[in-house]
Image (spheres, rainbow, N blue to C red):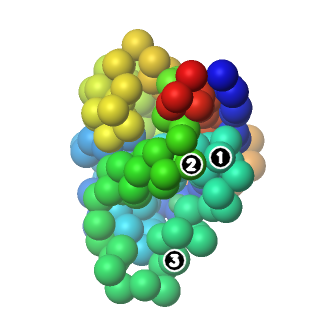
Amino acid sequence: MSTRSGIGYDSHRFVAGRPLRLGGVSIPWTHGLAGHSDGDAVLHAVVDALLGAAALGDIGTHFPDSDPQWKGVESARFAREAVRLLGERGLVPVHVDVTVIVERPRLGPHIAAMREATARALGLPVDEVSIKAKTNEGMGWIGRGEGLGVVAVATVRGSSG
Ligand code: MG
């Protein structure tokens, strides 16, 4: 049985007038995240981690923002597609761990819903999906509220073993 891990990172700029989507849920806030899709940086980092674990490239390879079919789509679609691509290589996700670095809004009240939606998109039990949030202590572009960053680690396993 082979176990592999992959890392993913994403960052998006905050823009006024867009809904804020993170971890597959809508979060009430004055700004959303810029992006060709819904801008869900949590799911984008998770997708990159999954693809990395399978050495399948990155999210831009599979879902290029030059392709109109991905415009405005829910990022859960990318997650489901990444799981399908892993399946073609005989791999299944078993665990993901995510850290969101954002000054505001505070994500504490939304973490449970984000975990549930992310788990659903990946076909995982919710206790195999960890999502944490922290501030950047007011430092730099995150501290100034210009955007947010996300890091994710995914663990995948051979589906036959
Ligand atoms: Mg992204």
> Type of residue at label 1?
Ala
Q: What residue does disc 2 label?
A: 89
Q: Nearer the viewer, residue 129 or 12?
A: 129
Q: Residues within 10 Å of mark 3 (few under 14, many from 20)?
A: some
Residue, x 51% and y 31% (percent of image)?
159
Q: Nearer the viewer, residue 68 or 107?
A: 68
Q: Does 1 sit left or right of 109 as displayed?
A: right
Q: Residues within 10 Å of mark 1 (few under 14, many from 20)?
A: many
- Residue 88 visible in the shown view: yes
Q: What residue does disc 1 label?
A: 54
Mark 2 vs mark 3: in front: 2
120 versus 36 height, above or below: above
> Type of residue at label 2?
Arg
| Residue most extreme to the front | 160
Label 3, label 1: how many angstroms apart (C-alpha)? 19 Å
Label 2, label 1: how many angstroms apart (C-alpha)? 8 Å
Label 2: which secondary element = loop
Q: How many marks?
A: 3
Instruction: Answer with the quarter of the image where residue 106 lies.
Output: top left
Image location of residue 123, percent across then percent down: 33, 32
Image location of residue 35, percent across then percent down: 45, 69
Q: What residue does disc 3 label?
A: 64
1 versus 142 height, above or below: above
41 versus 129 height, above or below: below
Residue, x 42% and y 74% (percent of image)?
36
> Type of residue at label 3?
Pro
Q: Are marks 2 and 1 in contact (CB under 8 Å)?
A: yes
